[in-house]
Each structure stands twice: as structure tokens, then as C-alpha cells.
């Protein structure tokens, strides 16, 4: 953990921290003797996460705070930020990780669109608005990690609300990173985590055993920290099925739809299937 903010006594806040990638990151922070705050929904899930983190933390429960928080509510996050500042003296590491994927379609239902955008996109914006100003005023080394998705880059058909939310998250994280680095007095860096196939509650879909192609949340967090140590903004994760080289080609093909004036989502267009297959083979 070479990033200067990841040191004993610093404070990490993780939204969506009661399970999955969020909990795996919180556990790494706790073991490194950071104060750790997990924000999530579900009192039982939060209690279970707090118990795990208490056992991980060298200083036990005094370094752990678990709070119910709806990231779609700016007020909830402002209240949490104030509690973190009062208890631990401010935030040094902010991981905006909370997300949902209940499924969606272009024509609705509208309630699904509203909730997905409220949590996945507004949750990131709200978290940044609630925490980053205080981090900047503190003048300390800081780290912001935003959890995005490959679906926000290649936008495959099938779940448009999720794609829209994660495309917005990518754009916001890029703007945040640019804004922070423009300030010569700011010692905070921002990074976009782009997971591969990770076996979590979000992706399990009824499965109880990890598919061979998936990474664990712990593997994802290890990779994330390694790439942040190297200074990467785009933390593009492979998995056991998809290599970085494959991801790069898919991303470049998606960008090529605009440059080459192909049909939208041509990768899935029947008239372009052969061309895409040839391209992926290296032709």
C-alpha cells in the first residue's frame, strides 16, 4: 500500500462496504490499521461486516464504524461525513463503491431507471460532494476510488439503465481527477476502478459457488491497490476469462463506432458480426 494516504491511523470510508468488493477493500484497510467506516443498507449486513472488521483491525472496534446510509441521499452522506470528522478527524480515503443492478429495459419500468441512477450515479456525485471538500480543506494526502464498470465503456445491450449510470460515473470520475490535479496544493488523487467478472452478491444470480471465470473480491482489491501504487487512473481489471488485451480491443472497437461511422453497438449488429470476429482474431 504505497499510496501515501494508506497508512496506520488514516481514515477510510467505503460506501457499499458491507459486502463484495467494498467489504474486501474495507478489510484490507482495517488490516493495515486504518480507521474504517462502512456505509451501506441493512442493519444485519452492517452488523456482520462490523464484526468481521473488528476482528481484522489491530485496534479492534475503536477503529471501526458501520452506518446505515442511502447514498442517493446527499443529506445522509453529509451527516456521515460530519460523524467521521468528529470521531476520526476527517477522511483520507474515500471509496465510492455502492451500486445496484436489478435489471432494466429501454422502455422501463421508470422506477428501476430512477433507482439505478439515484444509487449508481447520484450516489457517486453525492459522496464526492459530501466528502471531497473536507478532504481538500484538510490538506493531507488523500485517495478517492470510484467503482465503475466495463458496461459504462462498451455499453452492451441488455441493461441500459446500468450502462447509463456507469457511463456517467466514468465521466464524473475523470472530471474529478482532472479537477484535483489542477490544484497545486491538493494532495488527493482519484482513480476509476473498472472490475472484470467478480463473484459478488451483485453477480451471483442464484449461484452459490464462484464460476471459474470470475475473480474474487479479494483478488480485485489486490489488483486495484497494485495499480493505484503504479499511479493508474483507469484500473482496468482482467479476470480468469478476459485478458487486458481482449478488453482493450473491445474498448477500441466501441470507440471506432463513432470514428468509422458504424451503426450503434455494431459489435452486436448482425451485419458487423464477421468484421468484429475478424478484428478480434487480429485481422
Image (cartoon, grey):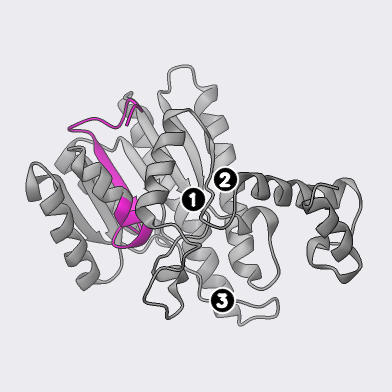
Residue 44, by quadrant, is bottom left
Horizontal side, residue 123 vs residue 103: left or right: left
Give percent across and percent down for residue 92. Answer: 30, 35
Q: Are marks 2 and 1 in contact (CB under 8 Å)?
A: yes
**Marker disc for residue 103:** 3
Report the Cα–Cα distance between label 3 and label 1.
22 Å
Based on the picture, tell me whether residue 6 belongs to the magenta stretch: yes
Horizontal side, residue 130 vs residue 109: left or right: left
Q: Which residues are magenta?
A: 1-24
* For residue 211, above or below residue 227: below
Q: Please state which of the two labelled residues, at mark 3 or mark 2, is closer to the viewer.
A: 3
Instruction: Point out the tag, 3 or 2, that comes first from the N-terminus.
Output: 3
Q: Are marks 3 and 1 in contact (CB under 8 Å)?
A: no
Front residue of 167/7: it is: 7
Q: Residues within 10 Å of mark 3 (few under 14, many from 20)?
A: some
Q: Residues within 10 Å of mark 2 (few under 14, many from 20)?
A: some
Q: Secondary structure at mark 2?
A: helix
Report the Cα–Cα distance between label 3 and label 2.
23 Å
Locate the N terminus and report the quarter of the image it occupies. Answer: top left
Residue 162, by quadrant, is bottom right
Front residue of 199/283: it is: 283
Q: Say which residue appears at 59% left-offset and 48% top-offset.
A: 170
Q: Say which residue appears at 38% left-offset and 29% top-offset.
A: 136
Q: Secondary structure at mark 3?
A: loop
**Marker disc for residue 125:** 1
Q: Which residue is mark 2?
A: 172
Give percent across and percent down for residue 9. Answer: 17, 33
Q: Residues within 10 Å of mark 1 (few under 14, many from 20)?
A: many
Report the Cα–Cα distance between label 2 and label 1.
8 Å
Give percent across and percent down for residue 273. Answer: 85, 65
Instruction: Point out the tag, 2 or 1, that comes first from the N-terminus.
Output: 1
Amino acid at each position: 500500500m504505497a499510496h501515501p494516504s494508506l497508512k496506520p491511523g488514516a481514515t477510510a470510508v467505503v460506501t457499499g462496504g458491507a459486502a463484495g468488493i467494498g467489504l474486501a477493500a474495507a478489510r484490507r484497510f482495517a488490516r493495515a490499521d486504518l480507521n474504517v467506516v462502512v456505509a451501506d443498507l441493512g442493519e444485519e449486513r452492517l452488523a456482520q461486516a462490523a464484526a468481521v472488521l473488528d476482528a481484522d483491525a489491530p485496534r479492534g472496534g475503536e477503529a471501526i464504524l458501520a452506518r446505515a446510509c442511502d447514498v442517493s441521499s446527499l443529506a445522509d452522506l453529509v451527516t456521515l461525513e460530519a460523524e467521521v470528522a468528529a470521531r476520526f478527524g476527517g477522511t483520507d480515503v474515500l471509496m465510492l463503491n455502492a451500486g445496484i443492478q436489478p435489471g432494466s429495459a429501454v422502455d422501463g419500468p421508470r422506477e428501476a431507471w430512477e433507482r439505478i441512477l439515484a444509487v449508481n450515479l447520484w450516489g457517486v456525485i453525492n459522496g464526492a460532494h459530501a466528502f471531497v471538500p473536507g478532504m481538500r480543506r484538510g490538506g493531507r494526502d488523500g485517495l478517492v476510488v470510484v467503482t465503475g464498470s466495463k458496461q459504462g465503456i462498451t455499453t452492451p445491450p441488455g441493461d441500459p439503465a446500468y450502462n447509463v449510470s456507469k457511463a456517467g460515473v466514468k465521466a464524473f470520475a475523470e472530471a474529478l481527477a482532472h479537477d484535483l490535479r489542477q490544484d497545486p496544493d491538493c494532495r488527493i488523487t482519484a482513480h476509476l476502478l473498472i472490475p472484470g467478472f467478480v463473484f459478488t452478491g451483485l453477480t451471483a444470480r442464484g449461484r452459490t459457488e464462484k464460476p471459474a471465470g470470475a475473480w474474487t473480491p479479494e483478488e480485485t482489491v489486490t489488483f486495484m491497490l497494485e495499480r493505484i501504487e503504479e499511479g493508474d487512473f483507469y484500473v482496468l481489471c482482467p479476470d480468469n476469462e478476459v485478458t487486458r488485451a481482449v478488453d482493450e480491443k473491445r474498448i477500441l472497437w466501441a470507440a471506432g463506432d463513432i470514428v468509422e461511422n458504424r451503426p450503434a453497438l455494431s459489435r452486436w449488429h448482425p451485419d458487423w458480426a464477421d468484421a468484429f470476429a475478424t478484428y478480434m482474431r487480429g485481422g
